């Protein structure tokens, strides 16, 4: 079962950053300086859990043109299970 929630603690944010590190920095070879930016503190971050395990993350950032949904990352072993769709739904709500 997939559950999502808005991040409210430093520990949850650390989990989100670890997911992003594994997906973007390790898997996709994105430079960490590019992945983590000056908007981290002003964004609304979300975590997805599958059977209690943090497995996906996303964030919403306000821009001059409206809100932007970004930094969607799902751990490899949880892909294809609806985690990304659950994160989109959480962001849209």
Image (cartoon, helix red, strand yellow):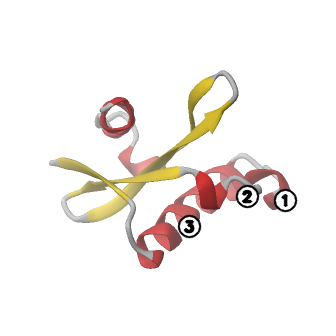
Distance, label 2 to label 3, CA atoms, is 11 Å
Q: Quadrant of residue 53?
A: bottom left
Secondary structure found at label 3: helix
Q: Camera-side residue: 25 or 11? A: 11
* Residue hosting label 2: 36
In the rendered structure, the answer to whether residue 39 lies left or right of residue 67 reads right
Residue sitting at 61 percent across and 54 percent down? 42
User: Residue 34 appears at what percent x and percent y?
Assistant: 82, 51
Q: Is residue 53 above or below residue 60?
A: below
Q: Quadrant of residue 83?
A: top left
Q: Is residue 66 visible?
A: yes
Which label was assigned to residue 18? 3
Of label 2 and label 3, which has the lower sequence position? 3
Question: Disc 1 or disc 3, which is closer to the eye?
Answer: 1
In the rendered structure, the answer to whether residue 67 lies left or right of residue 84 reads right
Residues marked 2 and 1 touching at CB (< 8 Å) = yes
* Residue hosting label 1: 33
Q: Is residue 92 above or below residue 29?
A: above
């Amino acid at each position: 079962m997939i559950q999502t929630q808005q991040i409210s603690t430093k520990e949850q944010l650390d989990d989100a950053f670890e997911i992003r590190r594994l997906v973007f920095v390790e898997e996709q070879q994105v430079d960490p300086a590019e992945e983590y930016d000056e908007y981290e503190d002003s964004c609304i971050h979300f975590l997805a859990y599958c059977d209690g395990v943090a497995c996906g993350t996303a964030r919403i950032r306000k821009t001059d043109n409206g809100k932007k949904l970004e930094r969607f990352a799902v751990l490899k072993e949880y892909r294809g299970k609806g985690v990304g769709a659950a994160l989109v739904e959480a962001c849209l709500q």
